[in-house]
Amino acid sequence: MTQLELTPDQLLTTTRTVRKRLDLSRPVEPELIRECIEIATQAPSGSNSQQWHFMVVTDADKRQGLAELYRKSFSPYRTDSLKGLKKLQETNPEAAAVQERVVSSADYLSEHLHEVPVHVIPCIRGRLEGASLPQQAGSWGSILPSVWNFMLAARARSLGTAWTTLHLIYEKEAAELLGIPYEKFTQTALIPVAYTLGTDFKAGPRKPLDQIIHLNSW
Ligand SMILES: Cc1cc2nc3c(=O)[nH]c(=O)nc-3n(C[C@H](O)[C@H](O)[C@H](O)COP(=O)(O)O)c2cc1C
């Protein structure tokens, strides 16, 4: 598989959340997903524990099931987002314009999620409810870097991804659908994966650095 010619900085700054530009009609080769997962596993994990599992869903009925769970969560989330957007329009129209695009894009993904050819659900061993802060940090920190590795590897191969978490409200139902042992493994995200329509992506709008860097004292 030929990879896109991107410098490390280009790869890191142009791996966007892709929703409207997912090619819903083009199948994704299973070997490519395997390659991306292999690269995912080069991420760090606490004590090199590697307690990660990657549930890859290509079955159409199961993707439909996951999309239905996602949409059940999306609906109240959307209502809240629109309320937040209204406030933002009054106080910061520039930020509101960015947020409007996110809402429209998120609407599209929600409507079409079942059509995205591959869904990947990264899981970590253990349940995190009631865990202490260091335990939680250890668990999340031992899975999320691998997920981002996966997304970067996908981008290099002309695949688009989107980090989503909304289906987790119905994590138990998703576990039943996919046979994931719920008591032993926590689902951490649902990453839709498809080829992108075009491969040119830009850096996204971000807060100015001076608002977020604290030198020597907060
Ligand atoms: C922890 C996390 C959860 C997210 N959950 C969702 C989600 O459920 N649905 C969705 O459409 N986007 C979701 N996103 C994507 C964000 O909306 C997106 O990263 C943000 O708008 C910035 O866009 P960019 O990734 O293209 O820079 C999530 C991102 C993160 C990091």
Image: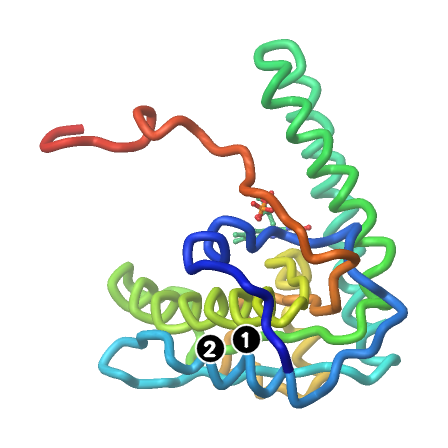
Vertical placement of residue 175 versus 167, above or below: below
Could you tell me if residue 177 is visible in this image?
no
Residue 63 or residue 69, whichever sits in front? 63
Residue 8, position as x, y percentages in the image: 42, 60
In the image as oriented, which residue stretches furthest toward the left? Answer: 216
* Residue at (67, 15) in percent of width and height: 89
- Residue type, label 2: Ala
- Residue 88: % across, % down: 62, 18
Where, by quadrant of the figure, is residue 181 drawn? bottom right
For the residues labelled 2 and 1, the Cα–Cα distance comes to 10 Å
Seen from this angle, which residue lies furthest top?
90
| Image vertical order of residue 156 relative to residue 101, above or below | below
Q: Position of residue 185 (x, y in %)?
A: 50, 81
Colour scheme:
rainbow
Quadrant holding the N terminus: bottom right
Q: Which residue is drawn at 30% across and 85% down?
A: 49
Per the image, label 2 sits on a secondary structure element best described as helix
Q: In terms of depth relative to the viewer, which is nearer, 213 or 70?
A: 213
Using the rendered image of the protein, determine whether residue 163 is visible from the camera's viewpoint: yes
Q: Nearer the viewer, residue 154 or 97?
A: 154
- Residue 130 shown left or right of residue 163 in the figure: left
Q: Mark 1 points at which residue?
A: 122
- Is 89 left or right of 150, judged from the image as shown? right
Question: To which residue does mark 2 refer?
Answer: 40
Are circles 2 and 1 on residues that touch, CB within 8 Å? yes
Q: Residue drawn at (27%, 83%), measured in percent from left and top?
A: 48
